[in-house]
């Protein structure tokens, strides 16, 4: 029996599509940043990275700040995302984040300024916010160096 190109039979005889049809959508409060097909999407969860491939079971998770990678063929797109949520449903990876920046557009000078700031926070809340801002700046600088 002939099967359409790009399909195969599973061990159970069920037809499976081997051509990925994953889609990645990235949305910020200002705009839809990205809506494109992907073979693999790697998101920065708050407790580590998560790779999402075609036919992933539904998922909702909390994002941390870091690198979002969208792989398609031999190319990859890299974005810095600043927390938020990810939803996977029906082969659509939806990333809702307050900030999504192509790593080529990271403001290196601003990130360096955060690390060089001599401001000393005295309250626990201020110290925590300052530490998080410094962590974000370090991640942005690392991504900018890796992808330039």
Image: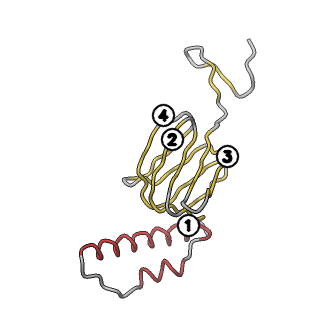
Rendered position, 67 above or below 39: below
Q: CA distance from mark 2 to mark 3?
A: 20 Å
Task: Name the N-terminal-most of marks 1 and 3.
Answer: 3
Q: Residue furthest bottom?
A: 118
Contact check, label 1 and label 3, Cβ < 8 Å = no
**Dot 4 corresponds to which residue?**
57
Q: Position of residue 116 (x, y in %)?
A: 42, 85
N-terminal of the pair, mark 2 or mark 1, is 2
Q: Position of residue 24 (x, y in %)?
A: 60, 47
Alpha carbon distance from label 1 to label 3: 20 Å
Q: CA distance from mark 2 to mark 4?
A: 7 Å
Residue to which mark 3 is pinned: 73
The C terminus - image quarter: bottom right
Which residue is depicted at the point 51% across and 41% down?
88
Residue corresponding to mark 1: 146
Which label's residue is closer to the chain start, 2 or 4?
A: 4
Q: Quadrant of residue 106?
A: bottom right
Disc 4 and disc 3: Cα gap in Å? 22 Å
Q: Which residue is mark 2?
A: 88
Label 3: few (<14), some or many (≥20) within 10 Å? few
Question: Could you tell which of marks 4 and 3 lies nearer the N-terminus?
Answer: 4
Q: Residue at x 44, y 72 (%)?
A: 138
Label 2 with label 4: CB-CB less than 8 Å: yes
Q: Nearer the viewer, mark 4 or mark 3?
A: 4
Query: How far across and how far down the image is residue 102, in percent?
Result: 60, 64
Q: Circle 3 sits in a helix, a strand or a loop, which is it?
A: loop
Q: Closer to the camera: disc 2 or disc 1?
A: 2
Could you tell me which residue is drawn at 44 percent across and 43 percent down? Answer: 60
């Amino acid at each position: 029996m002939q099967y359409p190109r790009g399909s195969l039979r599973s061990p159970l005889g069920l037809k499976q599509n081997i051509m990925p049809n994953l889609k990645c959508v990235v949305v910020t409060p200002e705009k839809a940043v990205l809506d494109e097909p992907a073979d693999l999407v790697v998101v920065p969860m708050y407790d580590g990275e998560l790779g999402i491939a075609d036919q992933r079971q539904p998922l909702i998770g909390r994002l941390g700040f870091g690198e979002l990678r969208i792989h398609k063929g031999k190319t990859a797109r890299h974005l810095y995302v600043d927390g938020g949520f990810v939803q996977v449903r029906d082969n659509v990876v939806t990333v809702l984040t307050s900030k999504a920046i192509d790593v080529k557009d990271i403001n290196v000078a601003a990130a360096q300024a955060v690390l060089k700031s001599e401001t000393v926070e005295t309250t626990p809340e201020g110290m925590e916010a300052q530490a998080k801002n410094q962590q974000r700046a370090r991640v942005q600088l690392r991504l900018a160096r890796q992808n330039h």
